[in-house]
Image (cartoon, grey):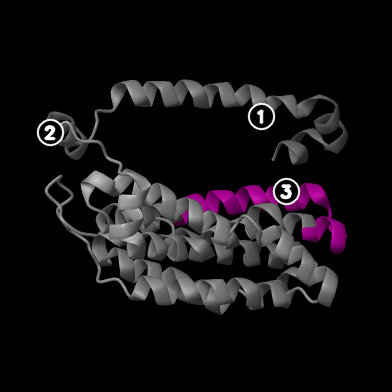
């Protein structure tokens, strides 16, 4: 957005400092939120019982390894597709397709806004129709859209490029919005923090950590972008199958007395 507004040369010379300065506002907002928002009733209950929302790794892996693995596999496709959206397709459009970088950066910004909107929608739908069902809708859309979107991108048409990105954000938002609630409901309170953290981190490693590099390798090796879609679609299918193995935990009691995941 700034590059499109200021121009490429101004962005290189001095405009790059603006995002760093604006990040100070995020720090202030974070401090205000942290000081004004109360801890959850579950966390307060654990404090009263002198318990921590964590667990030794050995105990966690012994008793909750299945939940951790499912958490990782469910997040994997969303994280990979997200990195493709924010870290690869703009670079691909600029460097490989030789499309104008300012317009592509603007498209990337608008796609990020779309992702935010559909994430909110995903959270709302997760409450209404169930976390698992919302995930299933999102990942089904991702499987179906992962390949066709590349034909729109390769058209070098800015409008079709934008449609391809927004289409992906619909799937991303619906498979991201209900995530926090689903994960919290999978683990009992005493291991919730550690279980979710480890599962989320593993999902990021399986998914986004290598996604741009794999996508670049696919392009460099085969020269056909739709194969990147096959890669993302395959991950989405794995995540879809994994989340479908879960009996929707919507409405589960999150209190400290929880005994299972």
Left or right: where 255 falls relative to 19: left
Gap between marks 1 and 2 measured at Cα: 44 Å
Q: Which mark is residue 19?
A: 1
Q: Nearer the viewer, residue 235 or 119?
A: 235
| Badge 3: residue crowd in 10 Å (few <14, some 14–19, many ≥20) | some
Q: Position of residue 166 (x, y in %)?
A: 58, 61
Between circles 2 and 3, the one closer to the viewer is 2
Image quarter where the C terminus lies is bottom left
Q: Is residue 167 above or below residue 99?
A: below
Q: Earlier in the sequence, mark 2 or mark 3?
A: 2
Q: Secondary structure at mark 2?
A: loop
Q: Earlier in the sequence, mark 3 or mark 1?
A: 1
Instruction: Give the dominant element type of the magenta stretch: helix, strand or loop.
Output: helix
Q: Nearer the viewer, residue 259 or 28?
A: 259
Left or right: where 199 falls relative to 160: left
Q: Which mark is residue 105?
A: 3
Q: Nearer the viewer, residue 35 or 197?
A: 197
Q: Secondary structure at mark 3?
A: helix
Q: Which mark is residue 49?
A: 2
Viewer can see residue 27:
yes
Based on the picture, tell me whether residue 212 belongs to the magenta stretch.
Answer: no
Q: Is residue 61 above or below residue 44?
A: below
Q: Earlier in the sequence, mark 1 or mark 2?
A: 1
Q: Which residues are magenta?
A: 92-118
Gap between marks 3 and 1 measured at Cα: 15 Å
């Amino acid at each position: 957005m700034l590059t499109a507004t200021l121009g490429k040369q101004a962005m290189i010379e001095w405009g790059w400092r603006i995002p760093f300065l604006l990040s100070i506002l995020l720090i202030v907002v974070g401090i205000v939120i942290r000081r004004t928002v109360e801890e959850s009733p579950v966390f307060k209950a654990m404090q009263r019982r002198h318990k921590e929302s964590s667990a030794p790794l050995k105990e966690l892996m012994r008793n909750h390894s299945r939940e951790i693995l499912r958490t990782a596999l469910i997040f994997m496709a969303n994280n990979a597709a997200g990195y493709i959206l924010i870290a690869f397709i703009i670079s691909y459009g600029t460097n490989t397709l030789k499309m104008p970088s300012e317009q592509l950066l603007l498209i990337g910004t608008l796609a990020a806004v779309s992702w935010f909107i559909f994430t909110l929608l995903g959270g709302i739908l997760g409450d209404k129709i169930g976390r698992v069902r919302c995930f299933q809708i999102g990942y089904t859309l991702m499987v179906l859209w992962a390949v066709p979107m590349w034909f729109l991108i390769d058209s070098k048409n800015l409008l079709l490029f934008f449609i391809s990105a927004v289409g992906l954000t619909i799937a991303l938002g619906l498979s991201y919005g209900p995530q926090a609630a689903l994960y919290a409901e999978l683990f009992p309170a005493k291991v919730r923090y550690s279980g979710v953290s480890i599962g989320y981190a593993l999902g990021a490693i399986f998914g986004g950590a290598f996604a741009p590099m794999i996508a670049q390798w696919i392009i460099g090796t085969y020269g056909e972008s739709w194969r990147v879609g096959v890669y993302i679609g395959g991950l989405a299918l794995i995540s879809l199958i994994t989340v479908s193995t879960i009996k929707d935990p919507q409405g589960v009691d999150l209190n400290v007395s929880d005994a299972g995941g």
